[in-house]
Image: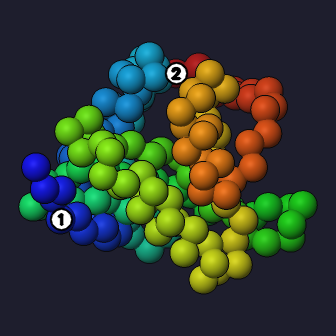
């Protein structure tokens, strides 16, 4: 079986339903579906317009959504440089083993090089395959405690 031909481009408003579906699949995979409180409408509202809160890339094969990576931008005080924070990286099960995760990460890294940004992301400490994948990309894995807080709904 030959590998499909993939294209990677910036996420556009027309991709929101596919991104939302993959976002939910990722949350299901991580056993954290109850934390998905956004909606396609909210993603569209916050991801586009004059001041988007998030951005991302989508990989397609024959016009079908295969994978995505999303990120936010802020400032990394220690380096004194902009920071790109990768929020999600997900490849649909039928499209795994074609290097899409690698391609999407390289796309984010290229953006970081263009802007002089520092790139960071988190990974579950028991996800050894992901940690090995990130190390192959040249990332340094640091095991730290991750804290989070959100207001009650």
At 45% from the left and 46% from the top, the residue drawn is 89
Give me the C-alpha separation between circle 1 and circle 2: 43 Å
Q: Which residue is drawn at 18% across and 65% down?
A: 5
Q: Is residue 112 left or right of residue 37?
A: right
Q: Where is residue 147 in the image (x, y as percent from the top left)?
A: 75, 27
Answer with left or right where residue 112 lies relative to residue 63: right
Instruction: Give neighbour class at mark 2: few <14, some 14-19, many 20+ (Cα, 10 Å).
Output: few
Circle 2 residue: 153
Which residue carries the number 1 mark? 5
Q: In which quarter of the image is residue 31?
A: top left
Q: Which mark is residue 152?
A: none
Vertical placement of residue 153 versus 98, above or below: above
* Helix, strand or loop at mark 1: loop
The front one of 54 and 41 is 54
* 39 to 56, vertically: above or below: above
**What is the secondary structure assignment of the residue under circle 2?**
loop
Residue 21 percent location from the top left of the image: 25, 37
Q: Earlier in the sequence, mark 1 or mark 2?
A: 1
The relative height of residue 63 versus residue 26 in the rendered view (above or below) is below
Above or below residue 116? Residue 142 is above
Pick whichever, 114 or 131, lies toward us. Answer: 131
Q: Residue furthest bottom?
A: 114
């Amino acid at each position: 079986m030959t590998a499909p031909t993939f294209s990677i481009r910036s996420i556009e408003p027309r991709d929101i339903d596919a991104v939302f579906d993959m976002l939910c699949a990722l949350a299901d995979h991580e056993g954290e579906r109850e934390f998905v409180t956004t909606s396609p409408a909210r993603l569209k509202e916050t991801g586009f317009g004059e001041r988007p809160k998030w951005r991302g890339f989508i990989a397609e094969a024959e016009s079908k959504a295969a994978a995505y990576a999303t990120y936010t931008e802020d400032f990394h005080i220690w380096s004194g440089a902009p920071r790109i924070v990768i929020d999600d990286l997900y490849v649909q099960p039928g499209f795994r083993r074609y290097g899409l995760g690698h391609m999407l990460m390289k796309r984010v890294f290229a953006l970081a090089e263009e802007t002089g940004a520092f790139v960071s992301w988190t990974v579950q400490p028991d996800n050894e395959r992901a940690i090995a994948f990130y190390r192959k990309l040249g990332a340094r894995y640091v095991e730290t405690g991750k804290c989070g807080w959100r207001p009650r709904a």
